[in-house]
Image (tube, rainbow, N blue to C red):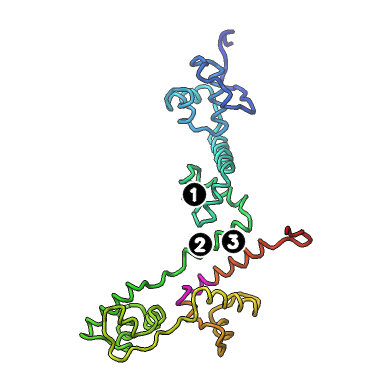
Amino acid sequence: MPSPTTRNTSQITLPTVLDPAACDDCRLAPGSLQRVRQMQALRQQGWSLDEIALRFGVSRERVRQILHAHGGPGAQDIADARRRRAEKQAEERIDELLALWRTGEQPRSAADKLGLQAAACRSTIDRFATDVDRAARKASMAGARRIQTYSDRDIILALTSVSVRVGRVPSAKEYAAHARALNYPSLPTVLNRMGGWTHALHAAGMRPLSAPARRRKRRWTEESCWTALRAVVGEIGEIPTVLAYERHASGRADLPSAATLRNRLGRWSAITTQLAAQRELARAMQPAPGQAVSA
């Protein structure tokens, strides 16, 4: 039979709610029952051994020893509590988290920037992200994936390289042949970007072999290409594949070719993703049926 002065602390009933900020931990005597209770409760709420050790001014190993000796929550209970605590911390910073996610950040990198747990960030985003958030993320990621067109300097270097190979100023046909073999900017890209072959040679510091031609005015700018694409989507009622677009634009002078669109805007997959994001954003901005529109 245990003596009257002996206490069995292995079966301590933990408080259901404990406000750690309200505890006067530092005033509690080391080894006191109240100190043990608070360590156990904090552990049950998902605090790590390091966090508890810092709060009480002891080592991590000392906290482990106390919890081992006096009983504490099981491993699964601790894991569940830590998950709930991490999710609560993520929810408290949901505005910052969604702002990063909308710009294309992955949950793990957003978690690193905010000092949160990656898994908690993923689950919180899944629960709180709206259709508008998802559309904004799609638009951001589509813009990031767009193919970067060649710069003027890239084209000039390619022209110079080809002229060295042929030993003179190349013709447009000669440049096209070498560009295919060397993976240089294509001849149509050079012509569209520089406004014609003669102007491209002038930009590279070369004298054209023939009389200079009149500078071509670029008809299909990036903006006009997007306008034409949105018009086609409105005409056919869906976002077209590249083959569907080519059939629809065949013989129409008011629409750019699919090749021109890819040259101006990037890959077709990036174009269609951008169009889809724009449509979702437009739908999200429309007032609900019966909703009054403010003046």
Query: Residue under circle 2?
Result: 141
Query: Residue under circle 1?
Result: 110
Q: Position of residue 280 (x, y in %)?
A: 63, 65
- Horizontal relation, residue 136 to residue 162: left or right: right
Q: Position of residue 159 (x, y in %)?
A: 29, 79
At a point 49% along the width and 33% down the height, the residue shown is: 48
Q: Secondary structure at mark 3?
A: helix
At a point 45% along the width and 31% down the height, the residue shown is: 50
Query: Is 15 or 230 nearer to us in this picture?
Result: 230
Q: Position of residue 195 (x, y in %)?
A: 39, 81
Q: Secondary structure at mark 1?
A: helix
Query: Residue under circle 3?
Result: 135
The quadrant the C terminus occupies is: bottom right
> What's the mark number on residue 243?
none
Q: Main secondary structure of the magenta part?
A: helix
At a point 54% along the width and 55% down the height, the residue shown is: 102
